[in-house]
Amino acid sequence: MFLRKRRLAHLLLAVAMIFGIAGSASAVSQHGPKPTIVLVHGAFADASGWNDVIRNLQRKGYPVLAPANPLRGVDPDSAYLRSVLATVKGPIVLVGHSYGGFVLTNAATGNKNVKALVYIAAFAPDLGDTVGGLSGQFPGSQLTPDALDIRPYPGGADGYIKLSLFRKVFAADVSASTAAVMAVSQRPADLGTLEQPSGVPAWKTIPSWTLVAANDQVIPPAAQRFMAKRAGAHIVEVKASHVAMISKPGPTTDLILAAARRTS
């Protein structure tokens, strides 16, 4: 009797171990690895604008990559980002700010690893759209030719936001000291970019999320809403300047996480 009970106990233990292992494997397959969050900055900025968002995402255990956007033109910038994405294994959530949205819309097309697009006060162009055309489609942008300093370079000309106007136009809801540092370290965009057409948009086949910055003086909020609705995006709106990822890192992170959870 004792031996039979002992054998039965061993059998039950073995069954429990088998089911435990199976249950564990099932949980891994259901949830899978967390996606890599790739953050793309726009013009007049650099990847440091994502710093607070990066910290928030890393605290949540997400792998993050914030590459430099060359800001040389729609085609070369998209090609560069496409090459970066090709080095990332597994699922990707692709996030863009401002002109960075223009770049990711082109770079993600046809990439099966990109599972979600997130636009933060960003352009979400359709086929044939240009930065200049979308900016002028709705009134309200303060990023006019008069707001720029033009600096020629061999092969083209770069635009910088005038230092005296930078905070008002670009970053009205960050501190004066922070805006002053951003202004003198801004990365310019080639002016030829304004009239370069967009290609087939990735949002046609990849789900998208949009954070509309209601106090944006660069991309009019009406333009952001128009592009988001056209793309069928999940829309969140916050009272923020153009640099919503800096002044509102919490809501920005929350929207990225909402997109990331939908990829699992």
Image (cartoon, rainbow, N blue to C red):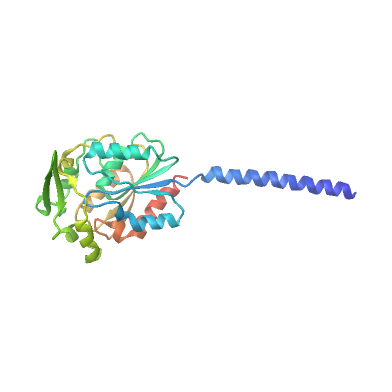
Quadrant hosting residue 191: top left
Locate residue 247, reporting x and y percent: 29, 61
Is 79 positioned to the left or the right of 167 in the image? right
User: Residue shown at 38%/51% (left/top)?
Assistant: 256
Judge by depth and name the residue closer to the eye, 209 or 95.
95
Residue 70 horizontal/vertical position (percent): 25, 43
Question: Can residue 260 be seen here?
Answer: yes
Farthest residue toward the right? 1
- Of residue 205 and residue 14, the one placed in the foreground of this image is 14
Tell me which corner region of the image, top left, top right, bottom left or bottom right, holds residue 29: top right
Question: In percent of the image, x 26 and y 35: which residue is there?
Answer: 199
Q: Position of residue 23 (x, y in %)?
A: 62, 46
Q: Quadrant of residue 105?
A: top left
What residue is at 17 percent from the left and 42 percent from the top?
194
Q: Would you say residue 201 is visible in this rendering? A: no
Q: Would residue 213 appear left or right of 36 to someone viewing this image? A: left
* Residue 21 horizontal side relative to residue 108, left or right: right
